[in-house]
């Protein structure tokens, strides 16, 4: 039965909303998640499942990733469901001398924070991943990086929350939020209204439209990523692989070369390879394109020449929730009591989902968090 009231209403049934629902349920808080389509029908169902620490900016971003990683270590056991979690390490391939310079200082910064990551020369990189091309300039490697199936993760958070008595409703679009005397009072949905004092905006790339309902501008934009899926093949790569161009594009847009986007390569549990991904601002258009597919196929097969002999069986695209500084927007919003942000994780939402869910639940429950969320506040964009 559709609830008439709840302590917390979570808007969005992606990996972030699902994790928040689970962590609130563990704290015995009566929460409801509402999703306008199906669970994991947004970015969380159209992405890779790489859990990279070494791609995170040293500082609060990396701290959030480390908190998540510590939780991932026991999450499969805790949820008691198959998540296809593995910890084979991750590699960032470096294709030219410019990238090598950027990665040298990026890695040094990370090592200074105590992260286990090192630079490999081309020979060492090929010793670890023999299918890599001889033409690379090097790679970085961290044994901490891991992988997971993002759809299984989202569904597992939801079903574990349901075991605690929480509920998630699909085909249930939020159409309005009533605020009275500066506090959230009611969330209106296509299936009825829910009285509540807390609404969590976990609507991913759609978070700005939820913000509009309470007159709060939110600087999140959809950033399309196209992915190719190959037929299942015997083990070809062990680590998750990203290219340094990803890091360069994410944190230093002046060095971005739009015609030479970064790539990701990940062999799934079943042997299919996921080859990605574009980074495009094209509104909410989720179609794949000839140019996108061609660029990914060309670039990934330059990095792993054997890919030329493997068939692509599918292509799809997802919309990353992009923010201007690459960091998510988390926490309370000034001026509207009970309106909480948990969106804008761009290409890191899967990796950051356990920490995000745990911290937002902690914030709602006790009003503060053991990792400060100040750096992630929406208000950082207002100055
Ligand atoms: C190609 C690609 C590769 C990626 N690879 C990785 C990776 O390897 N590792 C990683 O960590 N991250 C990766 N990401 C990023 C990751 O997918 C996202 O950061 C993450 O899924 C965001 O989760 P979310 O729950 O915030 O958003 P979403 O999964 O998009 O969920 C938001 C939900 O809100 C719902 N919603 C919107 N408006 C309303 C409304 N009015 N009422 C009710 N519901 C509403 C939507 O339908 C949607 O289901 C990748 C993304 C892409 C596109």
Image: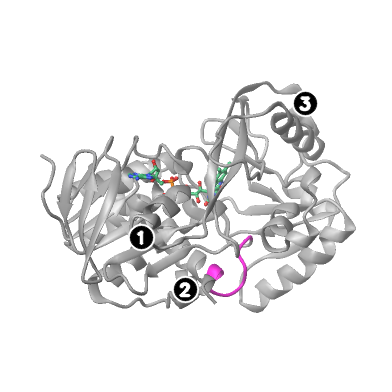
- Kindly indicate whether the residue at mark 2 contacts the one at mark 1 (C-beta within 8 angstroms): no
Q: Nearer the viewer, mark 1 or mark 3?
A: 1
Predominant SS of the magenta segment: loop
x, y percent for residue 131: 76, 38
Q: Dot 3 corresponds to which residue? A: 308
Q: Nearer the viewer, mark 2 or mark 3?
A: 2
Is 155 left or right of 162, judged from the image as shown?
A: right
Q: Nearer the viewer, residue 338 or 214?
A: 214
Q: Secondary structure at mark 2?
A: helix
| Residue at x 30% of width, y 71% of height | 363
Residue hosting label 2:
379
Asked whether disc 1 touches disc 3, contact meaning CB atoms under 8 Å apart, the reply is: no
| Residue 211 percent coordinates (x, y) | 39, 57
Mark 2 or 3 closer to N-term? 3
What residue appears at the point 29 percent right and 46 percent down from the top-left corner? Answer: 174
Q: Nearer the viewer, residue 90 or 7?
A: 7
Which image quarter is the N terminus in? top left
Residue carrying label 1? 357
- The part of the image, by quadrant, that contains residue 282 is top right
From the image, which quarter does the C terminus lie in? bottom right
Q: Is residue 135 above or below residue 110?
A: above
How far apart in space, not on screen, are marks 1 and 2 (Cα)? 20 Å
């Amino acid at each position: 039965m559709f609830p008439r009231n709840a302590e917390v209403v979570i808007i969005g049934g992606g990996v972030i909303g699902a994790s928040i629902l689970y962590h609130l349920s563990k704290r015995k808080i009566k929460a409801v998640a509402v999703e306008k389509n199906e669970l994991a029908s947004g970015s969380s169902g159209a992405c890779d499942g790489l859990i990279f620490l070494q791609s995170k900016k040293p500082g609060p971003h990396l701290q959030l990733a480390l908190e998540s990683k510590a939780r991932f270590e026991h999450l499969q056991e805790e949820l008691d469901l198959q998540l296809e979690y593995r910890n084979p390490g991750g590699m960032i391939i470096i294709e030219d001398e410019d990238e090598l310079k950027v990665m040298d200082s990026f890695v040094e910064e990370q090592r200074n924070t105590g992260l286990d990551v090192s630079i490999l020369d081309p020979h060492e990189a090929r010793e670890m991943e023999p299918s890599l091309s001889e033409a690379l300039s090097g790679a970085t490697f961290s044994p901490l990086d891991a992988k997971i199936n993002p759809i299984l993760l989202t569904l597992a958070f939801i079903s574990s929350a349901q075991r605690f008595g929480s509920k998630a409703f699909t085909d249930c679009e939020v159409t309005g939020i009533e605020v009275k005397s500066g506090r959230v009072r009611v969330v209106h949905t296509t299936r009825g209204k829910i009285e509540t004092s807390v609404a969590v905006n976990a609507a991913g790339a759609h978070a700005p439209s939820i913000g509009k309902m309470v007159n709060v501008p939110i600087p999140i934009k959809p950033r399309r990523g196209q992915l190719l899926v190959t037929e299942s093949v015997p083990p070809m790569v062990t680590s998750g692989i990203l290219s340094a161009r990803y890091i360069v594009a994410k944190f230093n847009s002046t060095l971005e070369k739009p015609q030479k986007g970064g790539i990701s390569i990940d062999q799934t549990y079943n042997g299919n390879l996921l080859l990605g991904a574009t980074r495009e601002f094209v509104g909410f258009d989720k179609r794949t394109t000839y140019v996108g597919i061609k660029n990914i196929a060309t670039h990934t097969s330059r990095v792993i020449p054997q890919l030329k002999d493997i068939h692509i069986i599918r292509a799809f695209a997802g919309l990353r929730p992009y923010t201007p500084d690459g960091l998510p927007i988390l926490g309370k919003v000034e001026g509207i009591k009970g309106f909480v942000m948990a969106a804008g994780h761009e290409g890191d939402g899967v990796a950051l989902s356990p920490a995000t869910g745990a911290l937002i639940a902690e914030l709602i429950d006790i009003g503060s968090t053991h990792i400060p969320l100040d750096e992630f506040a929406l208000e950082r964009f207002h100055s």
